[in-house]
Image (cartoon, grey):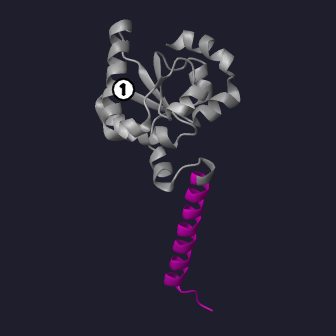
């Protein structure tokens, strides 16, 4: 029996499409993101909890893009709150620029702004909206959930005394 090359190519293409769709869906689900945000997160600069905690990025300024209620429950170090909802309206963009400008005036250096949320979806969206401002941004991989798995709140001040 002779195999039809067109049929083989069609089967391989189908398997590739199904496999890729499955990979993207599983990744989006495990990272608790919608599929477009998960895909865009691949090109978003990120920093791991361990790298941030070890001071591999200095100086840093933390911006929490969650809701005020979430911020009141827990936050990382001396983070400042600029909710994603405000960034989406444009008001938050100017807030972030003002926070960065104040930091630069006080410390005479431009910080890298670490955006974080609960798990990464909102901070990835915020990054996409803030990327054109000329400031340096990264997203904390896994958000505050990943941070708290590794770092208890009582250690935040000591860690950030070295990197802010």
Q: Is residue 39 above or below residue 74?
A: below
Q: Main secondary structure of the magenta part?
A: helix
Image location of residue 72, percent across then percent down: 56, 26
Residue underneath mark 1: 96
Image location of residue 76, percent across then percent down: 57, 23
Closest to the observer, 121 or 92: 92
- Rendered residue at 69%/27% (across/down): 150
Does the rendering let one see residue 47? no
Closest to the observer, 37 or 51: 37
- Secondary structure at badge 1 equals helix
Q: Which quadrant of the view contains residue 112?
A: top left
Q: Residues within 10 Å of mark 1 (few under 14, many from 20)?
A: many
Image location of residue 114, percent across then percent down: 47, 27
Q: Is residue 54 above or below residue 35?
A: above
- Rendered residue at 41%/29% (across/down): 137
Closest to the observer, 21 or 119: 119
Q: Is residue 36 within the magenta segment?
A: no
On screen, residue 80 versus residue 136, left or right, reads: right
Magenta extent? 1-28
- Rendered residue at 45%/40% (across/down): 44
**Where, quadrant-wise, is the N terminus in this rendering?**
bottom right
Image location of residue 108, percent across then percent down: 35, 8
On screen, residue 63 versus residue 103, left or right, reads: right
Q: Is residue 49 above or below residue 40?
A: above
Can you name the residue that lies furthest to the bottom here? 1
């Amino acid at each position: 029996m002779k195999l039809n090359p067109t049929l083989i190519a069609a089967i391989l293409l189908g398997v590739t499409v199904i496999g890729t769709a499955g990979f993207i869906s599983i990744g989006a689900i495990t990272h608790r993101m919608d599929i477009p945000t998960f895909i865009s997160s691949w090109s978003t600069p990120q920093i791991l909890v361990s790298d941030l905690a070890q001071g591999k990025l200095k100086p840093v300024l933390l911006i929490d893009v969650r809701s005020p209620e979430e911020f009141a429950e827990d936050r990382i170090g001396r983070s400042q709150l600029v909710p994603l909802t405000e960034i989406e309206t444009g008001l938050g963009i100017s807030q972030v620029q003002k926070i960065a400008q104040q930091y630069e005036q006080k410390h005479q250096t431009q910080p890298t702004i670490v955006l974080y949320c609960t798990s990464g979806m909102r901070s990835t969206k915020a990054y996409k909206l803030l990327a054109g401002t000329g400031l340096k941004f990264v997203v904390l991989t896994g958000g505050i959930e990943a941070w708290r798995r590794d770092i208890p709140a009582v250690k935040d001040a000591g860690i950030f005394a070295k990197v802010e």
